[in-house]
Amino acid sequence: MGGAIGTRLAETGNRITVFDPGPDKMQALVDKGAFAAASAAEAAAASDYVILSLNAPAIVRRAVFGEAGVAAGARPGTLIIDMSSIDPDATKELAVAAAEKGLRWVDSPLSGGAPKALVGELTLMAGGAAKDVEDAYAVLQHVASNYTHMGPVGAGQTTKLINQVLCGLGFLAVAEATQLALDADVDAAKIPQALKGGRADSAILQEYMPRFVARDYRRTGRIDNMVKDLSGAQDLARRTNTAMPLTAACAEIHRMLTAAGLGGEDQAALMEFFRGPNKENFE
């Protein structure tokens, strides 16, 4: 995801300095005009904005506050924009720690994935002080077509969890409906057009039912990332005493597929859940 964001920023004329422990990931952006840094501290020292796109609170903490991390090089007042999808409470703790070092923090998780990032059409839900969220838009406008200030720090991450509940249930519903259509000998490839504009229509239906039909498993996301996000939603639900029975079922199906070795596959591989003994094997 970070590679797609970096690519879009480079292609829209921004001067970007990048750091990643994986040299190959950095090189792909250097080839597009980015400058490579030897550490997160060095990248931060050269930047007015620091954008993070990581996979867990512990990794974000290490990248910012660890040895040669962002906080070691960033100038006072630097705005950290965390586009990771992590726990809201962890985000609040990170923002407090950043403020103690004179740094600002906006959580701005995303929806739309790498394909939307590459064309500047991400949906971003931001949490932070109003001025910081406004300032963040100066750079985020290059990657987003929908940018909403949801409230204080952590509100963006909470909104992302809600987004993931809706997406997780949507992916599973469309996969289940696709299998029903296939088993009932209906041309499932025609269903998105047939339902377009109706109440059952959605971006997931339009993009993913054709992929489900074709068993198009090219990777634009990961099933195990959905497990992480749905687990986060369940944790939040326990804290708020919110009943979420459908989310629980959806999370368990994603966990089953991950346990079966499909965690690194795209959501399109949800179709594997419906394979019986007479269905084709996964390829």
Image (spheres, rainbow, N blue to C red):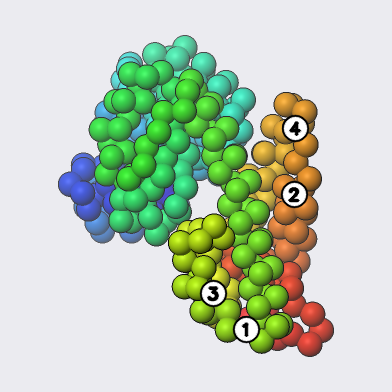
Q: Calculate the distance from the C-alpha at mark 4 to the C-alpha at mark 3.
A: 34 Å
For the residue labelled by badge 2, is the local secondary structure a helix, a strand or a loop? Answer: helix
Q: Residue at x 21, y 43 (%)?
A: 14
The residue at the far right in this view is 277
Provide the residue designation for mark 2. Answer: 246
Front-most of 153 and 164?
Answer: 164
Q: Residue at x 33, y 56 (%)?
A: 118
Above or below for 30 versus 134? below
Estimate the x, y position of residue 112 in percent, counting from the top left: 44, 52
The kind of residue on which mark 3 rests is Ile
Q: Nearer the viewer, mark 4 or mark 3?
A: 3
Estimate the x, y position of residue 187 in percent, counting from the top left: 58, 84
Provide the residue designation for mark 3. Answer: 191
For the residue labelled by badge 4, is the local secondary structure a helix, a strand or a loop? Answer: loop
The residue at the far front in this view is 198
Q: Calculate the distance from the C-alpha at mark 3 to the C-alpha at mark 2.
A: 24 Å
The reply, left or right, for residue 4 in relation to residue 279 is left
| Discs 3, 1 touching: Cβ within 8 Å | yes
| Residue 242 numbered tag | 4
Front-most of 91 and 120?
Answer: 120
| For marks 4 and 3 on the same chain, the one whose residue lies earlier in the sequence | 3
| For marks 3 and 1 on the same chain, the one whose residue lies earlier in the sequence | 1
Provide the residue designation for mark 1. Answer: 186
Estimate the x, y position of residue 205 in percent, counting from the top left: 53, 64
The kind of residue on which mark 4 rests is Thr
Q: Residue at x 60, y 48 (%)?
A: 166
Q: Residue at x 44, y 22 (%)?
A: 128
Q: Calculate the distance from the C-alpha at mark 2 to the C-alpha at mark 1.
A: 27 Å
Task: Please tell me how crowded label 3 is: few (under 14), some (14-19), or many (20+) other residues with Cα within 10 Å.
Answer: some
Q: Nearer the viewer, mark 2 or mark 1?
A: 1
| For marks 2 and 1 on the same chain, the one whose residue lies earlier in the sequence | 1
